[in-house]
Amino acid sequence: MPPLALSRAGVDRAAEHRLDEPWLAAAWSHPATRVLVISEGKAFVVDTERGSELVLLPSFEAPEGGERYFLGTDQDGVSYFAVALAGGTLPGRLDGDARPAGLREVGALLDDRQAGLLVHAVALENWHSSHRFCSRCGHATGPAAAGHVRRCTSCAHEHYPRTDPAVIMLITDGQDRALLGRHSLWPEGRYSTLAGFVEPGESLEQAVAREVAEEAGVVVDLPTVRYVASQPWPFPSSLMLGFLGSADERDGGTEITVDGEELSEAAWFTREELAAGMASGAVLPPSGISIARRLVELWYGGPLPEAARW
């Protein structure tokens, strides 16, 4: 499987330093330290011939007033921090060609190190923005452990970043056709693999079978379900766990009945049908940043036709 755009990294998260305030202070003030400024999931990038690059500022140029998160260090000893600004407003003092952009737009265009930095920062920002109050006593919480904990200002209970596991799966039938569906909110013609959140007390394999049955009415042959790869999906806090599996051919198990809520359409596609639909524009493939695209390509046997890329 080709590399997943949001699963790349080039920085050691160096968690051992998160409670070491003197070390963090020294790292912040070091002239080699670089800071990623984000606001509501966006950061400044500069477009180059090689792709896009994050604008990483020296710490003395970083804006004040935002929450500060320690992201880690690279093999050269450079430390990286993020500063999250409220209100969706990035500082306007950057000159040149810098522009604000989010992960969906530039995640696949950044190099491994910068992609990992932005995913980490966006995930932390999303979590902090939605966990301002203690779930035990209702009082305000504040950031701690270099941005990887929120501590209640009243009862001192510590809250840790949450990750919501979600399964995403490409199911095939006895003819090796792929089951793809269109979400009710997607544009006409947009098809992708099925996906859904794991419920409490449920195994990942059980979640695959349940979601496929609920959304498309197709019965999954549970012993055929196998894990492929994972990808963080901080929109706002998911971890996408990719699977392949086969439908149970017995007793009409491959018959499609969409739920009308999650999916408005679903169909079995041969490779030839998918290629023809994409060539004509009738079928739009999953985004290149998503693990869904890689699962489809894994079944397809290679990259989807060039004409279909968007």
Image (tube, rainbow, N blue to C red):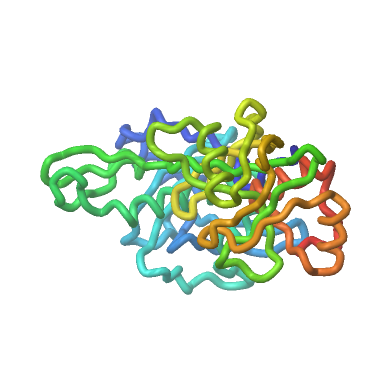
Q: Is residue 131 left or right of residue 171?
A: left
**Which quarter of the rendered picture does the N terminus lie within?**
top right
Farthest residue to the top: give it: 223
Q: Residue at x 36, y 39 (%)?
A: 24
Q: 75 or 146, which is in the foreground?
A: 146
Q: Looking at the image, can residue 181 be seen? A: yes
Residue 63 appears in which quarter of the rendering?
bottom left
Q: Residue at x 58, y 45 (%)?
A: 212
Give the x, y percent position of residue 273: 84, 56
Give the x, y percent position of residue 91: 45, 69
Q: 119 or 28, which is in the foreground?
A: 119
Q: Is residue 269 left or right of residue 27?
A: right
Give the mark count: 0
Q: 297 or 3, which is in the foreground?
A: 297
Give the x, y percent position of residue 168: 59, 44
Give the x, y percent position of residue 252: 67, 42
Q: 208 or 219, which is in the foreground?
A: 219
Q: Is residue 74 left or right of residue 254?
A: left
Q: Is residue 37 left or right of residue 99?
A: left
**Which quarter of the rendered picture does the C terminus lie within?**
bottom right
Q: Residue at x 37, y 50 (%)?
A: 127
Tell me if residue 80 comes above or below residue 49 in the rendering.
above
Q: Residue at x 31, y 41 (%)?
A: 149
Q: Looking at the image, can residue 114 be seen? A: no
Farthest residue to the front: give it: 251
